[in-house]
Image (tube, helix red, strand yellow):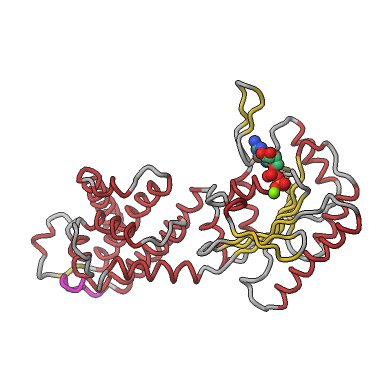
Amino acid sequence: MDIAAFSLIRLKEEIVNMGHVNIIVMGRTGAGKSTLINSVFRGNLADTGIGAPVTEGINEITKPGFPLRLYDTRGLESAYADRDIVMSHIGAIIKKAEKSGNDGELIHCIWYCINANSNRIEEEEAEIIRRTAEFGVPVIVVLTQAFGENAEVMKAYAESLSLNSCSVMCVLARDYNVGEYCVRKSHGLNLLIDKTLEVIPAELQKAFVRAQSVALELKKSRAEAVVITTAAAGFAEGFIPLPFADAAALVPTQVGMLAAITAIYGLEADKAAVATVLSALFGTMGVTLTGRAMAAGLLKIIPGAGSIVGGSISGSTAAALTFALGRTYISVVEKIYKGELGKDDLMKNKVRKEIRNEMKKNYKKSKRSSDN
Ligand SMILES: Nc1nc2c(ncn2[C@@H]2O[C@H](COP(=O)(O)OP(=O)(O)O)[C@@H](O)[C@H]2O)c(=O)[nH]1
Ligand SMILES: [Mg+2]
């Protein structure tokens, strides 16, 4: 079994099984919808996503392998009749999704964007938001471009209008240059992510965590949860001492864990990249990584591993190995995600050694806490 190829299959499965989160982004032209979309999701989605008009005034933004669909609306600022048409189109999209009977097709949330500097919300716009809320999908009112002192005042004002939204929040999606020497830092995106996550069905939350690129902590905590669950499952399975030579039996579970972590971070399914990371983790070079070689590479992180060849490993050792692998993988993937670690770096002996040392440390830590 070629582990890199197997990992890639598991990763693709993981991505497909995540399903889709669907969000409608409403608001007048210039409110900051595209800027918000580009800041929350990877890869300048609003500009590079495939924006096919679903109906007049509504664009569906998707990308292959991307677990999210966005509907970008236009025309809400136009004259009354046109606006009504856009609203009825939005209603139709929501109804059609409900009829499909599939959770992954439903519209899960609506972000209604209003420029925080607009001082007031016209009654007409307030009425549009109330009508939107009547569709039965949670509406979050996003006060965009919130760099001025007025934003909080605007928020209190919006909350007083009984818009029937589930939340009103101030967001500055991108840093704003106030003057030559004064920059307002972007803020509020983490809260928007948290609030949105609250209204998304549990089984689709992973998809949203993968798609968003703001909250790294969120990715990390979800990835850590995967490691803990996998290590615990391995522990239960491995209670019967595992013959050393059979440690490769753990490989499929561990590869599944790595795939889940990769998916959460939103990294692309790229065979060369997967192979490079695996070879750095397991201390192999050049050759195709087999399950047996992966197990052997992993067992080498156990202090004095040489002496247990032919013996067996206990369930707690199996769990500690899985834990060490998972924790170390998270730190590698996080560095790749942040651009701190590239493919070339992973080929360097110094970096590979650091990774192996980190895995040893993680192993000792886990073993110590399970032995106590
Ligand atoms: N610095 C900064 N500019 C923003 C922000 N949001 C919107 N803008 C600016 O406001 C203008 C309109 O934003 P855009 O996202 O195109 O609005 P849309 O028509 O709702 O998609 C653009 O020139 C943006 O650069 C923000 O969070 N930070
Ligand atoms: Mg736009």
Q: Residue 52: image x %, image y %?
A: 66, 62
In-front residue for pair 315/327:
327
Which residue extends farthest top? Answer: 181
Quadrant for the C terminus in the image: bottom left
Q: Is residue 123 left or right of residue 218?
A: right
Q: Quadrant of residue 245?
A: bottom left
Residue at 74%, 63% (x, y): give it. Answer: 137
Query: Eyeballing the image, is 132 above or below 47?
Result: below
Q: Quadrant of ligand 1?
A: top right
Residue at 21%, 47% (x, y): give it. Answer: 353
Q: Residue 66: image x %, image y %?
A: 53, 62
Residue 243 in the magenta stretch? The answer is: yes
> Is residue 151 shown to the viewer in this render?
yes
Query: Eyeballing the image, is 357 above or below 72?
Result: above
Residue at 83%, 52% (x, y): give it. Answer: 163
Q: Residue 272: image x %, image y %?
A: 32, 59
Residue at 22%, 64% (x, y): give it. Answer: 294
In-front residue for pair 111/314:
111
Chain part drawn in magenta: 240-247
Q: Is residue 67 left or right of residue 56?
A: left
> Is residue 206 shown to the viewer in this render?
no
Quadrant for the N terminus in the image: bottom left
Q: Residue 15: image x %, image y %?
A: 47, 67
Q: Quadrant of residue 179?
A: top right
Circle count: 0
Residue 361 in the magenta stretch? The answer is: no
Q: Is residue 230 left or right of residue 243?
A: right
